[in-house]
Image (cartoon, rainbow, N blue to C red):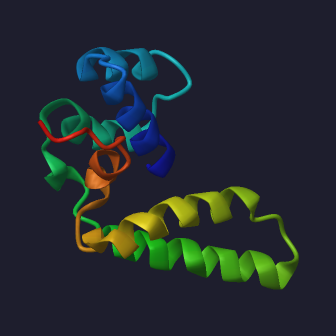
Amino acid sequence: MALLSEAAAQAADAGVDPAVFVDVLAKGGGAGAALQRMTPAIVTDDVGTVPFFIGNALKDIDYYRTMASASGASRTIADGVAGAIAAVVESGHGEAYIPELARFLRKPHPAA
């Protein structure tokens, strides 16, 4: 969901219609449960489809990172995901739902 959120943020910043973005992913390798659950947030801003706090996602990815370290497994991707989520939590959005991650990953827009 973190990667999907980042892709949705970049698509929005590039002016891609959210429905088109979802449609393209749904017809290819991006199809799956995460896309199905995130679609309402991407297309209509309905973030209630995944009522799971971003801060809890960070906690869970940290559990995985600890396990991977203990077993000597690679955690390169998990470290990147954790870094992105940690930045959002550190900016005060840990109690936002995970579908809101896309909004927090968008590039800043200058004030008018």
Residue at 50%, 29% in the rendered image: 30
Q: Taking the image as drawn, is residue 33 in sight?
A: no
Percent from the top left, x then y, of residue 8? Answer: 37, 34
Q: Taking the image as drawn, is residue 32 in sight?
A: yes
Rendered position, 80 above or below 23? below
Percent from the top left, x then y, of residue 14? Answer: 36, 21
Q: Quadrant of residue 10?
A: top left
User: Relative to 23, is 71 on the left or the right?
Assistant: right
Q: Quadrant of residue 46?
A: top left
Rendered position, 83 above or below 39? below
Front residue (pair 112, 79): 112
User: Relative to 83, is 42 on the left or the right?
Assistant: left
Percent from the top left, x then y, of residue 103? Answer: 27, 46
Residue at 26%, 17% in the rendered image: 17
Please identify the quadrant where the C terminus is shown: top left
Outermost residue toward the right in this view = 72
Outermost residue toward the front in this view = 112
Front residue (pair 3, 30): 3
Residue at 47%, 79% in the rendered image: 59
Front residue (pair 60, 8): 8
Front residue (pair 6, 106): 106
How many numbered markers are drawn?
0
